[in-house]
Amino acid sequence: MPRATLARIHPGNLRHNFRLAKERAAPARAMAVVKADGYGHGIERVARTLSDDTDYYAVACLEEAMALRAAGLIQPVLLMQGVHEAKDLQLCESENFTVVVHDPHQLGWLEAGYGRPEVWLKVNTGMNRLGFAPAGLARVKEELSRIGVRVTGAMTHFACADDAQSQATARQTEVFGQATAELGDITRSVANSAAHFRAGQPLFDRTRPGIMLYGSSPMLGRYGPELGLKAVMTLESRLIATRELTPGDAVGYGETWRATRPTRMGMVCIGYGDGYPRHAVHGTPVWIRGTRVPLIGRVSMDMLAVDLGEVPEAAVGDAVELWGEHIPVDEVAACAGTISYELLTGVTRRVPRVEDGASTTLHTGSDS
Ligand SMILES: *Cc1c(COP(=O)(O)O)cnc(C)c1O
């Protein structure tokens, strides 16, 4: 008999969000970014759900690209970090994976003839993480052409696109435009999710939306629904105990929260062992019986406490939403000093992912 803690996945909302990305990207085309296990939603489920809508996927690494092939998906896949070993180039060529080349050591592997996949060049326009200097780009492309490797694209990544006030994105865009102007007929790609929401932002040929597909806001200080996005994950659990506290009673490890008046509290069957952030502060909202109630005390590994003052009728067995349609994951992230990306990708294996409409009776496979 499993506990009722689960991540409910809404495929219809995922499709809605990707279509919104495509609309905002047009006339550029979008590719679905499904790295990190589909931002914690399950890479195969996510990729299959979007299969009719996308003609290209993007992932971080080869293992993720192979997971898409194992799921029967045939679209090209962009490996945004390229390969980590020379011998992987052959597999990329035969599987139609487009390999990002960001560093001279990867050029060396191509020159040594390990394989000839399609290549996109990464340009460092100011984030200073990965990529070739803008001035060196044409020479790299020529060198690859000389040895018979097809360079079909160039990309860069923005450091501050989430910040509507920052000038960095405009600077990076200009550097990218100049660096790629002479590269001929290639696909040019700059845009993460946030770039889709920046007025006047050039999106070039291909965009790479990730977080927005999952319903979370890519813009600082905004929540997904304000931007027309719908939550794709609802993190759910239940109340497993209630208790009356008298003034002075503390709750949880470290006794960091203490009742100042008679308080009815409840215990929810989810904790940091499930990926709920331990750093969520007192007052982080939780949804019970159509009402927001505040988290109190420290989050434990397997449970957390809430103040039920606003929902006197709440009882053991009540459903609890930790984030989803009513509590934006962005809001929980802000309360925990982090970002939605970390929360969504951090939901642990202990939490079953269950699709909308699927039975909530969970099977562990060993309960025969
Ligand atoms: C993850 C990633 C993206 C998607 O970013 P979001 O902010 O999730 O939209 C785009 N491009 C690159 C290179 C990435 O690594």
Image (spheres, rainbow, N blue to C red):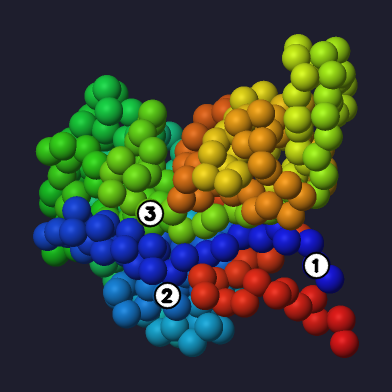
Mark toward the start of the polypeptide (2 vs 3): 2
Q: Residue at x 52, y 30 (%)?
A: 334
Q: Which residue is mark 2?
A: 49
Beta carbon of the mark 2 residue lies under 8 A of ligand 1: no
Q: Nearer the viewer, mark 3 or mark 1?
A: 1
Q: Nearer the viewer, mark 1 or mark 2?
A: 1
Q: Are marks 1 and 2 in contact (CB under 8 Å)?
A: no
Q: Position of residue 343 (x, y in %)?
A: 59, 44
Q: Which residue is mark 3?
A: 230
The three-letter amino acid code for the residue at tag 1 is Pro
Q: Is residue 45 left or right of residue 191?
A: right
Q: Nearer the viewer, residue 362 or 94?
A: 362
* Local SS, label 1: loop
Mark toward the start of the polypeptide (3 vs 1): 1
Q: Is residue 117 in sight in this rendering?
A: no
Separation of residues labelled 3 and 1 (CA atoms): 28 Å
Q: Is residue 239 above or below residue 15?
A: above
Q: Position of residue 53 (x, y in %)?
A: 29, 74
Residue 2's label in the rendered image is 1
Q: Quadrant of the N terminus?
A: bottom right
